[in-house]
Amino acid sequence: MNVGIIGLGRYVPERVVTNFDLEKIMDTTDEWIRTRTGIEERRYADDDVNTSDMAYEAAKEALADSGIEAHQIGLILVATVTPDQPFPSVSTMIQEKLGATNAAAMDISAACAGFMYGVITAKQFVESGTYPYVLVVGVEKLTKITNFEDRNTAVLFGDGAGAAIVGEVSEGRGILSFELGADGSGGKHLTQNGPFLEMNGREVYKFAVRQMGDSAENVIAKAGLSKEEVDFLVPHQANIRIMESSRIRLGLPEEKMSTTIKQFGNTSAASIPIALKEEVLAGKVKDDDVVVLVGFGGGLTWGAICLKM
Ligand code: ACO
């Protein structure tokens, strides 16, 4: 059976926070943020909008895009490190709101690589014939755990949600190959101890440059393809310089990589599905294109997928 993404959705809050807005509340500059990270603006959710609200909006859009009904979903997987509360899970909250009465539900904690873990977990359930459709959401309200006294991290993050319906697709399409991995020894470099996210940016940067490139190359090889056969790269939107290093390793021109980081910043588990949806809407990713999705995050964790749309 071929398993792939049959519907995509995303939600970002309306409130735009530019680098110039951040200049007013911390010791930073638009120039520093743009040149070091590629970010120009990001979205912040209002106080009364929680993680599950954004997840619900993205999920609704993905459902509509897929053409299936909520009651047909067998499982809901929500990847997040910023749930509304430890339990009940975000997945159960959106299960109720969507009216997905036949769905099991659980959250996944794999930080920025969470959406990749979710899609690959979904694939197993669809392939085994257990569930016909699995809803996977990557969602973060990172502003809840952002320390606005720490300019090293505060400028990087934004809020948002992306969602996918995973189901059977026609012959030759869908997930051609994947790779998931973890290295707990690097966990100390990206943590939440107490209320805020803490990061050793240099260490995460080094790991990300190596891992994103390696994983992207690995899934292309596992799919039996050459780099020349890849049409588009959707990397985790963490830092434009990390993303560029992967793009250059794959030999892709600039216009063949998603750079939604400019307008949304790093939205962790939501970044890859938001970026993929944006590129489909922009007509840059089309049916039959070979797309490489690759992410990394706290844990440390990573994941990559080679996908034929
Ligand atoms: N504005 C102005 N100056 C700043 C800022 C800021 N916002 N932040 C740091 N600086 C200063 C530093 O204090 C330092 O000054 P110093 O030399 O006087 O000490 C200088 O800029 C250079 O700092 P570096 O840390 O060397 O900057 P670098 O080029 O490494 O960029 C960054 C930092 C952007 C954080 C980079 O290391 C990075 O992107 N790392 C990976 C981060 C990442 O991708 N994290 C993923 C998290 S995913 C998740 O799970 C949520």
Image (cartoon, rainbow, N blue to C red):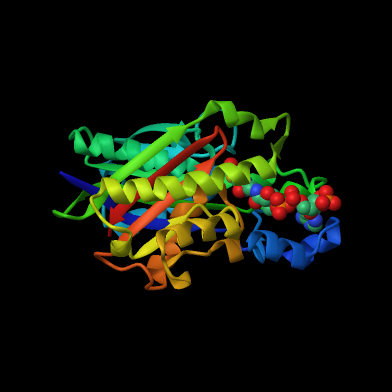
- The quarter of the image holding the N terminus is top left
Residue 178 in sight from this viewpoint: yes
Q: Is residue 178 left or right of residue 279?
A: left
| Residue drawn at point x = 41 percent, y = 38 percent | 117
Residue closer to the observer: 307 or 15: 307
Quadrant of the image occupied by residue 27: bottom right
| Residue drawn at point x = 84 percent, y = 55 percent | 26
Counting from the top left corner in percent of width and height, residue 239 is at 60, 55
Q: On screen, 108 above or below 225? A: above
Counting from the top left corner in percent of width and height, residue 161 is at 51, 51
Q: On screen, 129 above or below 248? A: above
How many numbered badges does the structure rendering display?
0
Residue closer to the observer: 32 or 155: 32
| Residue drawn at point x = 52 percent, y = 64 percent | 259
Counting from the top left corner in percent of width and height, residue 151 is at 79, 50
Q: Is residue 199 left or right of residue 279?
A: right
- The quarter of the image holding the C terminus is bottom left
Residue 69 in sight from this viewpoint: no
